[in-house]
Image: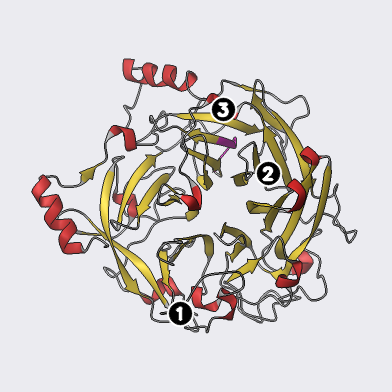
């Protein structure tokens, strides 16, 4: 039974705390420089934190002589697809701007990856759009979509084809328990803008194992039209949870409840009526029942809130954006609600950073965990403002796509300022580097490094896949992942 607001307040009052604080074993990480950490100078505490960081994970990163990916000793990478270099089975270049990605088991031991291509605006602006494959196009005016990448024999055989085309700004998404990918459009553009022929801002489903199922792509309008980021599925209860990356005002976390009698499965969502089920936005409160207007108010790792859900008046945003349909005090907001991943009988989700557009404390990233049984959310990771964005000393910023690791903790793709990393968090509360993007797309005087995206493990846990968004490179990383303590119980079987 879900925890009601009254139950949450009464239980918290009995404990006698203003907020519930998670035990230290529950706290995933606080990087050096985090808000919860000491500030200024090399204090004993800071020195201890730095020593702990160096002792955590897989060791220091070694610069790549090829200038692509720095990894710890014992690890290696392989480029699977690259825009302008690799080609689709139909002959066109791999589309650019790789983003959200997930892996699925294919036939005869193959791995299938569905890759979003975050291509916004007019199709003519992009040299390498997703090709308009006949029968798989939603809107011929849009450049985005998804490709399916088949990897066999340890990467020695790679094939890539169009999953869907003619969608826009395909940013994040989520894998489903029934083996498909839900791809989100991070836009609210309507027909008539940027040469679009149809409205955008929807979720689309892509089946990596059944190309016929991807014909005539249709938006899942029941999940709403807004700047979609990620989505997860609660297989037990049937809910879908979705993040929104938007500002003016800040975005929302949504929950979709299926209509009575609905059973999930391949292709079932696209057959729903546009108003099927119930779409709601979150509203959180502390142990005194006090409403929290924005997640940037939180400054302590372990803080736990109760969650209510508020009905969305017009989920298709016919005249007013969904997030603007609520007045002050009706819902909770957060800046750049980004990646999500299901695990530990709930899901982790990201608020990438907060600055002057948010009412609380400035930060460079939060990771929250939502427990659907208790209907509570707990702050697991809080990154302080990074003042050394070009450094490589564990000062991470801008968490974006995330995945739950089969070896414990999370793996997070960095989308911040300066240097970009893949970094991990342990269950003991430490962060550690996994990879660094060494591909400078700027100049020697003004270096620039694209964000990492699409981080996810293969089904067997042996390969970590990730993307360098610009120019568009999908890499497979292998190595002694077992060096971290193994923990089972992740994913949809937990």
* Residues rendered magenta in the picture: 416-422
Q: How is the image coloured?
A: secondary structure
Q: Which mark is residue 482?
A: 3
Residue furthest out toward the front: 108
Q: Position of residue 401 (x, y in %)?
A: 54, 48
Q: Which residue is mark 1?
A: 320
Residue at image position (72%, 76%) is 139
Upstream in the sequence, badge 3 or badge 1? 1
Q: Which residue is mark 2?
A: 468
Q: Is residue 183 above or below residue 388?
A: below
Secondary structure at badge 2 equals strand
Q: Is residue 430 visible?
A: yes
Contact (CB < 8 A) between labels 1 and 2?
no
The quarter holding residue 217 reads bottom right
Comparing marks 3 and 2, which lies closer to the viewer? 3
Upstream in the sequence, badge 1 or badge 2? 1
Upstream in the sequence, badge 3 or badge 2? 2
Q: Position of residue 33 (x, y in %)?
A: 40, 30
């Amino acid at each position: 039974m879900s925890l009601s607001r009254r139950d949450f307040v009464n239980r918290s009052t009995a404990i006698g705390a203003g907020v519930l604080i998670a035990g230290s074993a529950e706290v995933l990480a606080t990087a050096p420089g985090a808000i919860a950490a000491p500030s200024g100078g090399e204090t004993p505490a800071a020195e201890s934190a730095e020593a702990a960081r160096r002792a955590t994970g897989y060791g220091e990163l070694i610069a790549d002589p090829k200038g692509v990916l720095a990894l710890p000793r014992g690890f290696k990478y392989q480029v699977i697809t690259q825009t302008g270099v690799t080609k689709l089975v139909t002959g066109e270049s791999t589309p650019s701007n790789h983003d959200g990605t997930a892996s699925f088991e294919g036939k005869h031991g193959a791995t299938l990856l569905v890759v979003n291509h975050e291509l916004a605006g007019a199709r003519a602006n992009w040299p390498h759009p997703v090709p308009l494959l006949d029968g798989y196009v939603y809107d011929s005016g849009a450049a985005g979509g998804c490709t399916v990448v088949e990897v066999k024999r340890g990467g020695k055989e790679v094939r890539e084809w169009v999953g869907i085309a003619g969608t826009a700004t395909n940013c994040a998404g989520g894998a489903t328990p029934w083996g498909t990918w839900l791809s989100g459009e991070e836009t609210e553009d309507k027909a008539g803008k940027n040469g679009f022929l149809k409205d955008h801002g929807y979720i689309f489903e892509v089946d990596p194992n059944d190309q016929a199922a991807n014909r005539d792509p249709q938006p899942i309008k029941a999940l709403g039209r807004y700047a979609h980021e990620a989505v997860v599925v609660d297989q037990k209860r049937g809910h879908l949870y979705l993040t929104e990356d938007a500002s003016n005002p800040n975005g929302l976390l949504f929950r979709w409840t299926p209509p009575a009698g609905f059973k999930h499965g391949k292709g079932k969502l696209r057959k729903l009526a546009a108003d099927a089920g119930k779409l709601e936005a979150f509203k959180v409160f502390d142990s005194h029942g006090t409403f929290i207007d924005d997640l940037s108010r939180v400054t302590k790792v372990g803080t736990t809130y109760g969650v209510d859900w508020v009905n969305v008046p017009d989920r298709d945003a016919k005249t007013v954006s969904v997030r603007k349909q609520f007045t002050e005090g009706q819902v909770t907001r957060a800046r750049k609600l980004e990646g999500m991943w299901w695990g530990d009988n709930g899901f982790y989700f990201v608020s990438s950073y907060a600055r002057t557009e948010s009412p609380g404390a400035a930060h460079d990233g939060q990771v929250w965990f939502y427990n659907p049984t208790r209907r509570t959310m707990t702050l697991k990771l809080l990154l302080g403002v990074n003042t050394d964005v070009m450094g490589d000393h564990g000062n991470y910023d801008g968490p974006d796509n995330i995945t739950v690791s089969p070896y414990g903790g999370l793996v997070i793709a960095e989308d911040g300022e300066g240097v970009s990393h893949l970094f991990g968090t342990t269950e003991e509360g430490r962060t550690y580097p996994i990879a660094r993007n060494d591909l400078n797309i700027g100049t020697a005087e003004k270096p620039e490094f694209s964000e990492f995206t699409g981080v996810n493990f293969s089904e067997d846990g042996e390969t970590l896949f990730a993307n360098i968004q610009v120019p568009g490179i999908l890499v497979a990383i292998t190595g002694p992942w077992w060096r971290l303590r193994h923990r089972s119980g992740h994913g949809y079987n937990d």
